[in-house]
Image (cartoon, helix red, strand yellow):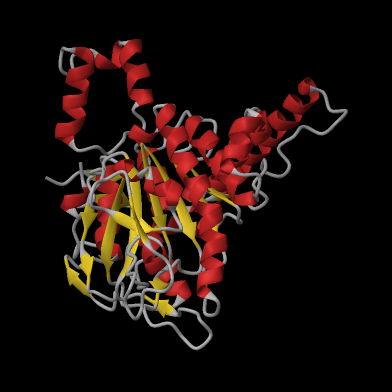
Amino acid sequence: MKCRYACGSPEHALHRRKFLGALAGITGLGTVGFFTRPAVAKELQKRQKHMLVIYLAGGVSQLESWDPKPGTDTGGPFRAIPTSVPGVHISELLPHTAKQMHRMALVRSLNTKNSDHGMGHYQMTHGRNRGGLNVPHVGSLVNRLLHPQDCPLPGFIHVGRNGDIKDAGYLGPQYGSLGLPSGGPPAGIARPKGLSVEADLRRHGFLRKVNDHFLAQRRSAETEAYTYSYEQALRLMEQRHVFEVDREPEKLREAYGTHPFGRHCLLARRLIEHGVTYVQVNHTNYDTHHENFDFHIEQLGEFDRTFATLLEDLASRGLLEHTLVVVMSEFGRTPRINVRLGRDHWGRAWSVALAGCGIQHGAVVGKTNKNGTAVTEREVDHGHLFHTYLQALGLDSLGTVNVNGRELPVADPSREPIEELLA
């Protein structure tokens, strides 16, 4: 069965069987009358799915994280330690994360056949190689298919870097990302001092009339996106508190870490909690062509405690069961250690980690050989992962989306989900 997602349609594109089953479980009456029952609407809101990506920019080493090979010629100096899942070991640089493995899953058999930063980033966030079709970023696609239209916050927020309307590809600019480069509230959303609420409303009313007049004569995807963004900015002004992580208890802020990555992850949790559908947080400086081991001690030391706190916090609030969390990079690092004690770009045998909703917790998919130079079991790539993300969120990744009357595949039709990962 293929679900078809029409641009402009607000409904969530869930698998029919799962959706109807969920409704039956809520109402006890199947689908009869569910649109008129407030309790059902509230329950469906609680079941909104989210996706949170932690992007380790530069290419984290799989050998120092998810697929250690201690005691081999490529393994480096670090041990493998047990996790909360019996038989599953990860690097000793991730002791806090190891205690969260029962909420996670690993893919250790990625082969993206690429060692270029730009291409790797595109592959992992778009699910395809660059080509003629202007496909959307996964955040834009999830924004389009899952974000509630009445949510006052945007559906795709990128914490720690600028946003980009081009992320939306063929979906149109209104599904692009909002960037928070400083990790604080969007610039310019506070009402100017000395301007009364009444005067501000009159200003916006006049501007709406001007916009409507212009839009009636020169309607395009860009002008519609401008109008949409303007109205969204007005709603954002009433949501400034969501971006203020200092409202959180001091003890929790300390647990996340007072460094930028810790604050960004805490902000990501607040955004998810307030209805944002897709959030991406970057952690940088993993391009370790020299002093790989020292850099990973520092970077993963910062990542480890923050990430473990994030998973624990999401779980304690009941958010993790509705949130897919993915830790990805553009590629991994070479098994061979170079003359500068570094590892270079490597896309032929590396790993990613997932957690949360739709994922088979504790699963480990795929395997590499003794020293990590090749995939020996269940080889997959970015296209398989993209399908898996969407399926974990309850979306039909094998379906199509209607764009201006043209049916376009949601994900690469030559790939399919990694079934072993799906709950």
Q: Is residue 265 visible?
A: yes
Q: Is residue 259 left or right of residue 133?
A: right
Which residue appears at 77% of the width and 32% of the height? 191
Which residue appears at 53% of the width and 41% of the height? 268
Which of the pair 307/327 is nearer the observer? 307
Can you name the residue that lies furthest to the bottom here?
Answer: 339
Can you name the residue that lies furthest to the right here?
Answer: 194
Q: Is residue 202 left or right of residue 299?
A: right
Q: Is residue 4 left or right of residue 342?
A: left
174 w.r.t. 136: above or below:
above
288 w.r.t. 323: above or below:
below
Q: Is residue 115 left or right of residue 342?
A: left
Image quarter hosting the N terminus = top left
Residue 403 in picture, x, y percent from top left: 33, 52
Can you name the residue that lies furthest to the left here?
Answer: 1
Residue 140 in picture, x, y percent from top left: 43, 50
User: Residue 285 sits in which quadrant?
Assistant: bottom right
382 w.r.t. 326: above or below:
below
User: Residue 381 sits in which quadrant?
Assistant: bottom left
Which of the pair 141/311 is nearer the observer? 311
Count of marks overlaid on the render: 0
Which of the pair 204/238 is nearer the observer? 238
Q: Is residue 279 visible?
A: no
Residue 348 in picture, x, y percent from top left: 30, 76
